[in-house]
Amino acid sequence: MVDLKDMTTEEIEQFFTEFGEKKFRGRQVFRWIYGRETDSASDFSDMTDLSKELRERLADSGAYISSMKILKVQASKKDGTRKYLLGTGDGMAIETVFMKYKYGNSICVSSQAGCRMGCRFCASAEGGLKRGLTAGEIADQILTVRRDTGETINHVVIMGTGEPFDNYEQVDRFLKIISAKEGIGMSLRNITVSTCGLIEGIKRFTGEWPQVNLAISLHAPDDERRNEIMPVNRKCPVKEVVKAAGEHAEKTGRRVTFEYALMDGFNDSIHDAEKLAGLLRGMLCHVNLIPLNKVRGSAYSGTGREIAEAFRVRLEAWGVPATIRRELGSDIDAACGQLRASYSGTTTGVI
Ligand code: SAH
């Protein structure tokens, strides 16, 4: 049983060669799966430019094209954000968010079902890791949302549930699949990968994907506090994460984004802003300040507007560009850190 949706163009060509067919048949099938705006094929019988004999032989071989099921859609009344609960073939539920911005439509995809990073303030950490998603499952989030909304998707952020560098191989293959010109043809410059700071992953990414945007979740300016909220910091301490980010900016010439969730009375003082600026100044970077979103059962709460603004101003005064992120979808728990691995059945929505 092999899932053709989970193949890069090279892999699908090889599959067809081994199947005794011409290489170009692979790209032809890839186009059927990924290259059509809203009606991607999910069945070999749809592929009308393949001979009937080949279509039958494919179906008999056990090859198939997987498809996520839409379990639930919640639409924000405030801003057009749509949160999808999608089901995988083996019964996992993952969340994907579609957002409309002035500059185009954006999708936030999950890279794992669950997450094992254990960040104390994040809903995705509850329940731990179920499993990494396949490249095909990550990419299918885009196909599914594109089909459901009928809209073009211009930007992709890997900022949903999961840690992308804890599933590096699949994320790597996902980037190949969605940037292939025979398929979605997404520009690498319009893709952002966000990591909690796995240093080996950052280094590998710098070498392999220099055109893709890198975002790093920092959230605290020193080890003491970062250890408290992000267990990963014991393995990947702040200064080393910042160093790897600096090398990324230098080698790629691209601006690194740092995400910093402002938590009331915890990491939001003027002194903290100066400490953070001290770490980052001089680097080609930008800080995205996100007043922490509420997560049930979490000990931390978000910083108010005024203090957030004072924090931003101090960072800029110290030469570090910063913006306060406008949160979309908070009324449907679709904002950063509010995505969950499983479906609790307590929320209401449109099916
Ligand atoms: N594991 C990756 C991808 C998740 S991205 C990473 O850590 O970067 C999700 C972003 O939302 C991360 O920056 C994460 O730290 C942030 N986040 C998590 N919980 C949050 C919350 N309650 N409020 C605001 N941002 C949160």
Image: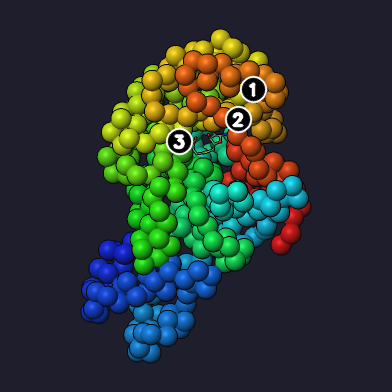
Callout 3: helix, strand or loop? strand
**On the image, numbered disc 3 is attached to which residue?**
215
Q: Looking at the image, is mark 1 or mark 3 earlier in the sequence? A: 3
Quadrant for ligand 1 reads top right
Q: Looking at the image, is mark 2 or mark 1 earlier in the sequence? A: 1
Q: Nearer the viewer, mark 1 or mark 3?
A: 1
Residue 170, given in percent of the width and then of the height, sits at 38, 51
Callout 1: helix, strand or loop? helix
Q: Is residue 338 above or below residue 262?
A: below
Spatial separation of the CA atoms under disc 2 and disc 3: 15 Å
**Residue contact at pointers 2 and 1, CB within 8 angstroms:** yes
What residue is shown at x 23% (from left), y 78% (from top)?
Answer: 22
Spatial separation of the CA atoms under disc 1 and disc 3: 21 Å
Q: How many marks?
A: 3
Residue 255, given in percent of the width and then of the height, sits at 40, 34
Disc assigned to residue 324? 2
Spatial separation of the CA atoms under disc 2 and disc 1: 8 Å
Q: Amino acid at mark 1?
A: Glu
**On the image, numbered disc 1 is attached to which residue?**
309
Q: Locate residue 302: give its quadrant.
A: top right
Q: Amino acid at mark 3?
A: Ala
Q: Nearer the viewer, mark 2 or mark 3?
A: 2
